[in-house]
Amino acid sequence: MKQSLPYHHNNLVQELITVGIHMVQEDGAKNLSLRKLAKACGVSEAAPYSHFKNKNKLFIAMQNFVTEKLMSCLKTAANEPEDIQTGRTILNIGKAFVMFFIDHPAYFTFLFSQPNIKIDLSSNLNSADYPPFQFFKEAAYRVYRKEGLSEERIKYGIVAMWAKVHGSASIASLNTISTDFIWEDALDQILVE
């Protein structure tokens, strides 16, 4: 008779999510199974199914977990009321985005491999953008309209800023990259250039 593993987790849902994200980074999304995840977390094969109906539901929970953490980080970085935000606020949001993924490189790999992450680079502020990008986009439009920039200049400026922020996060989150600088210090130069 197969002996079942003891249930010993205070927050199994969070552990399944965080361990799952790291497993995706190491082995790819196709190779993740709830059975393998249960084994990695030291619980019975049935335990994950009490929280997630299937792998797709787990992936949605993983995406929501990362998104909530990232949004909290970006909102903290903005830290000014909307009516007094400036270009510095946009820079702070961009830096926070990059630093978040430097601190959590597995999150970048996982998140931007998901097919339902949508980024709309048009000037449409009512699109169903991925919430962190929507937050960044809305803040940039607010600040740069206040500064009197044209709609076209703002739109292409946001594309350029997103390319720098997303590209920097992509590069900085790779474990094969070496630098002779500290990312947090360098981002003031990289993102403003």
Image (cartoon, rainbow, N blue to C red):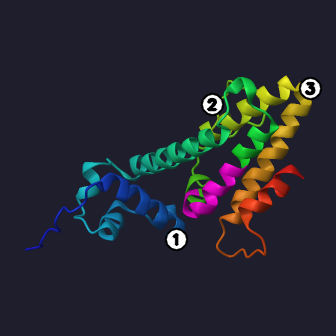
On the question of residue 118 being in view, the answer is no
SS of the residue at dot 1?
A: helix
Q: From the viewer's perspective, tell me whether residue 50 is left or right of residue 155.
A: left
Q: Seen from this angle, which residue lies furthest left?
A: 1
Residue 78: x and y in percent read 67, 38
**Which of the numbered marks, if any, corresponds to residue 150?**
3
Residue at position x 77%, y 26% from top?
A: 142
Q: What type is the residue that disc 2 sits on?
A: Ala
Residue type at numbered disc 3: Ser
| Neighbours of disc 3 within 10 Å: few (<14), some (14-19), many (20+) | few
Q: Is residue 104 magenta?
A: yes
Q: CA distance from mark 2 to mark 1?
A: 30 Å
Q: Nearer the viewer, mark 3 or mark 2?
A: 3
The residue singled out by tag 2 in the image is 128
x, y (%) of residue 38? 30, 64
The amino acid at mark 1 is: Glu
- Residue 121 vs residue 36: left or right? right
Q: Residue at x 66, y 50 (%)?
A: 97
Which numbered dot is residue 26?
A: 1
Image: 114 above or below 176: above
First reached walking from the N terminus: tag 3 or tag 1:
1
Q: How far separated are the C-alphas under marks 3 and 2?
A: 23 Å
- Residue 121, horizontal then vertical, whole percent: 77, 37
Out of 71 and 47, give the one closest to the viewer.
71
Q: Which residues are magenta?
A: 95-107
Query: Label 3's element?
Result: loop
Between 37 and 131, the residue placed more toward the observer is 131
The quadrant in which residue 32 appears is bottom left
Q: Residue at x 22, y 64 (%)?
A: 44
Mark 3, mark 1: which one is toward the viewer?
3
Q: In the picture provided, is 66 more to the left or to the right than 9?
A: right
